[in-house]
Image: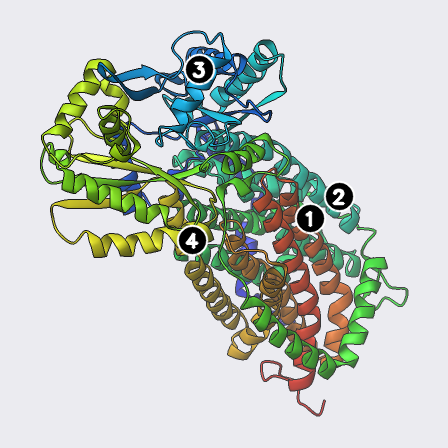
């Protein structure tokens, strides 16, 4: 009797699974070894993480920070909406006491507290210029409080920046010694102190304190990452378990998939920690992605295993397992590779480092899932005694598998689709045309404060500061002379003044402050406080004398955030009323043009720096990288599916429903006004890699049914729905529920990301079940051997 020759896949799995215990123990040792690196994991929610380390905006920011001693502050807004506002003895004494006591909090730089009680007023008397703190001693009378109000209003440097022009709010700006080390705890301690002291010290009016600022944003994001990781990963795990219980109704189907999920997540995050890559703001989605994707391979392998077991209950575990692996290795491998293609397309096309890490480590996780699915799962199945699943039972006439409830649902859908292929294709064409129109409305926009819910204290504080003050968002413009003491030159100072006026003319700018404001205030104080003397002195000899007079009355260190020790570099601080990219773009771009036009000579150089400048460059290239990522992902997926099926046409069939689903949801974004931002830019390339899985399994089933089982096209299509279609139904349940866990995130952008990718994958599933059979039924492609007449 002639022995049937084994295929290459059968030879491989026979050899690889000859000693299943060796495979299991080896896999466990690898997982344990990689998992041992997890304690090394650190969290990085800094702004700097989202820009390449060699980017000029980051270098400019670091230069400005070093020269002027600036950092990301935590800001307390003290508010009293009554007529007197903050200018009452009780409120001013509270501001002083809070400014004093906040210095004692661990992590706070005691020399970097800015408030009405720490800043100096500059005014003139008959004896000359006086430099005194606005609040030096306890305020006892309303007359003293009103004098402070007048002093602030007459000093443009602080009116609108340190205290609101209407007098109802004042800021206490607090800088930290190390925002990474102390940020989270310092923010909480500052908030607690402010609230407790307010309740104790302010009893005659209804006042409030709100804590915000860039330092607060960073610390909050770290807290949310930690909270999301503790919540989202276990929740994703639980919903996946529920899907598995319904899908297979066997204990082994549950724990085998659990082994894969745990192995993949532990290994991938262990590699990440071992390589010193921190958990960024976007990294929280990696475990959720891996859980959702890891389960898909196991679902298809187990589905094939239980289907073969129901058809051949007389065979051994080894025989059934090898039959399942022979049938599923190709689609499982190529769906994994298309997932990797999507993630790597994201990684190689984005300029944002944290997004690169999402792409790289999700790819590593997918490959780990493939390894465990092809080796660990069958190794365990071989050792287990065959046990039927209630979901897969042989039909009464012993022909095929009895269709359960879920299989019947998909089968009924299939009958409708196979009967109406042309209607489906016409509908698809109309949807594509509408999709192009809607997708054209998508635009880039984001604000860092949008990472927080509108109900959070930090969001409310940001909005209040933007309303009451000159703005909660800032950036810096550094003006540099070529020589030491170059900024004693009135002409150069007037260039700074003119630059400030231009910046203030731009939309969304609340105010600008610089050393020029202090020089003009000092000149005014020496000229009987006359308002018309709030100017830069024409005589260059007067300017150094003003600084000398200031040092005699006040502390020269007070000026370090405005001008450097050599009087060569000056900083202009710009306050913005709106932190959205679309608003910042209207400031940064004309400012760059103005600088290039007005500062052509070498005597004065200008650099734009600060957080909002980094934010502008962070988002400026996101549209290009997003669409490039989509293009690369589609091409890569088309090539891989073409290679898998040895047909370019089959590759086009595979990407058509995916492209349709992606276009639909960019259209939804356009019509709904959902902007393209850091979070939403992730979903497209990822969705392509994940969504094409459905098409690969569908085409693989139909091609095998026609070419190997000699079924007609109609028979192959109808045969696909109750078996492969049923497995894909649970596949989409698992993936959608896994990705859908992002909707429980504390960060609104990831809630939107979860909703988008979940709906997109579900749409791609439905599109694959409809469009691919409709294309095959209509055009009868050559990659199927069946004759048209058959």
Which dot, 1 or 2, sits closer to the camera? 1
Which dot, 1 or 3, sits closer to the camera? 3
Q: Secondary structure at mark 2?
A: helix
In this orientation, which residue lies closer to the viewer: 180 or 783? Answer: 180
Of labels 2 and 3, earlier in sequence is 3
Position of 605 compared to 614: left or right? left
Q: Secondary structure at mark 4?
A: helix
Q: Is the Cβ of the residue at disc 1 closer than 8 Å to that at disc 3?
A: no
Distance CA(mark 4)–CA(mark 1): 24 Å
Rendering coords of residue 711 (x, y %) = 73, 79
Q: Is the Cβ of the residue at disc 4 closer than 8 Å to that at disc 3?
A: no
In this orientation, which residue lies closer to the viewer: 570 or 345? Answer: 570
Residue at (86% x, 66% y) in the render: 398
Of labels 1 and 2, earlier in sequence is 2
Vertical order, 85 against 785 (above or below): above
Give the labeled residue for mark 2: 242
Residue at (54% x, 12% y) in the render: 90
Rendering coords of residue 359 (x, y %) = 46, 50
Q: Secondary structure at mark 3?
A: helix
Residue at (42% x, 61% y) in the render: 624
Q: Which mark is residue 737?
A: 1
Distance CA(mark 4)–CA(mark 3): 46 Å
Q: Is the Cβ of the residue at disc 1 closer than 8 Å to that at disc 2?
A: yes
Give the labeled residue for mark 3: 99
Vertical order, 376 against 333 (above or below): above
Which dot, 4 or 3, sits closer to the camera? 3
In this orientation, which residue lies closer to the viewer: 459 or 11? Answer: 459
Give the labeled residue for mark 4: 347
> Which quadrant holds the N terminus?
bottom right
């Amino acid at each position: 009797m002639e022995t049937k020759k084994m295929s290459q896949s059968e030879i491989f799995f026979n050899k690889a699974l000859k000693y299943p215990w060796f495979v299991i123990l080896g896999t466990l040792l690898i997982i344990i070894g990689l998992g041992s690196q997890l304690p090394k994991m650190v969290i990085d929610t800094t702004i700097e993480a989202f820009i390449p380390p060699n980017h000029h905006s980051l270098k400019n920011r670091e230069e400005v920070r070093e020269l002027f001693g600036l950092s990301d502050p935590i800001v307390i807004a003290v508010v009293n909406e009554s007529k007197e506002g903050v200018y009452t003895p009780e409120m001013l004494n509270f501001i002083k006491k809070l400014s004093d006591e906040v210095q004692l909090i661990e992590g706070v730089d005691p020399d970097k507290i800015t408030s009405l009680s720490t800043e100096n007023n500059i005014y003139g008397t008959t004896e000359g210029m006086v430099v005194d703190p606005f609040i030096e001693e306890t305020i006892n009378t309303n007359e003293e409080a009103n004098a402070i109000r007048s002093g602030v209003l007459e000093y443009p440097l602080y009116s609108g920046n340190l205290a609101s022009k209407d007098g109802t709010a004042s800021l206490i700006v607090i800088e930290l010694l190390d925002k990474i080390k102390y940020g989270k705890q310092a923010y909480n301690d500052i908030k607690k102190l402010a609230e407790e002291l307010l309740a104790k010290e302010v009893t005659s009016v209804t006042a409030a304190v709100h804590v915000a600022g860039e330092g607060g944003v960073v610390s909050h994001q770290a807290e949310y990452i930690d909270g999301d990781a503790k919540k989202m990963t276990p929740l994703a795990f639980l919903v996946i378990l529920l899907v598995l219980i319904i899908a297979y109704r066997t204990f082994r189907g549950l724990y085998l998939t659990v082994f894969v999920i745990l192995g993949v997540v532990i290994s991938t995050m262990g590699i990440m920690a071992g390589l010193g890559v921190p958990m960024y703001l976007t990294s929280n989605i990696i475990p959720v992605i891996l859980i959702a994707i890891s389960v898909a391979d196991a679902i298809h392998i187990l589905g094939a295993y239980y289907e073969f077991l129901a058809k051949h209950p007389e065979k051994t575990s080894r025989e059934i397992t090898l039959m399942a692996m022979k049938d599923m290795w190709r689609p499982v491998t190529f769906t994994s590779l298309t997932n990797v293609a999507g993630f790597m397309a994201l990684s190689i096309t984005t300029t944002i480092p944290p997004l690169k890490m999402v792409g790289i480590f999700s790819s590593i996780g997918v490959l780990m899932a493939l390894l465990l699915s092809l080796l660990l799962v069958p190794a365990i199945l071989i050792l287990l005694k065959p046990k039927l699943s209630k979901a897969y039972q042989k039909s009464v006439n012993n022909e095929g598998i009895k269709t359960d409830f879920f299989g019947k649902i998909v089968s009924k859908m299939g009958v409708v689709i196979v009967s109406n292929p042309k209607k489906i294709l016409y509908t698809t064409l109309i949807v594509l045309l509408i999709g192009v129109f809607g997708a054209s409305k998508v635009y880039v926009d984001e604000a860092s404060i949008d990472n927080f819910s509108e109900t959070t204290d930090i969001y409310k504080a940001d909005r209040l500061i933007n309303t009451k003050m000159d703005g909660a968002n800032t950036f810096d413009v550094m003006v540099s002379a070529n020589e030491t003491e170059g900024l004693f030159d009135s002409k150069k100072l007037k260039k700074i003044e003119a630059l400030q006026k231009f910046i203030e003319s731009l939309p969304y700018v609340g105010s600008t402050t610089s050393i020029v404001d202090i020089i003009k205030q000092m000149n005014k104080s020496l000229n009987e406080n006359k308002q018309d003397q709030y100017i830069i002195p024409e005589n260059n000899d007067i300017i150094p004398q003003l600084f000398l007079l200031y040092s005699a009355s006040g502390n020269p260190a007070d000026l370090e955030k405005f001008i450097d020790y050599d009087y060569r570099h000056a900083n202009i601080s710009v306050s913005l009323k709106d932190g959205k990219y679309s608003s910042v773009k209207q400031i940064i771009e004309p400012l760059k043009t103005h600088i290039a036009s007005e500062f052509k000579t070498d005597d004065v150089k200008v650099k734009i720096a600060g957080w909002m400048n980094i934010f502008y460059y962070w988002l400026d290239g996101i549209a290009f990288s997003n669409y490039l990522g989509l293009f690369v992902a589609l091409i890569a997926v088309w090539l891989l599916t073409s290679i898998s099926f040895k047909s370019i046409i089959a590759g086009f069939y595979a990407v058509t429903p995916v492209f349709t689903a992606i276009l639909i949801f960019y259209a939804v974004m356009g019509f709904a006004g959902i902007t393209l931002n850091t979070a939403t830019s992730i979903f497209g390339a990822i969705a392509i890699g994940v969504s094409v899985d459905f098409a690969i399994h569908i085409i693989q089933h139909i091609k095998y049914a026609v070419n190997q089982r000699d079924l007609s096209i109609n028979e192959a299509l109808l045969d696909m729905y109750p078996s492969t279609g049923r497995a894909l139904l649970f596949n989409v349940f698992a993936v959608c529920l896994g990705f859908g866990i992002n909707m429980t995130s504390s960060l609104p952008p990831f809630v939107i990301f979860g909703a988008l990718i979940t709906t997109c994958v579900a749409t791609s599933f439905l599109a694959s079940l409809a469009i691919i059979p409709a294309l095959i039924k209509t055009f009868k492609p050559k990659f199927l051997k069946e004759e048209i007449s058959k």
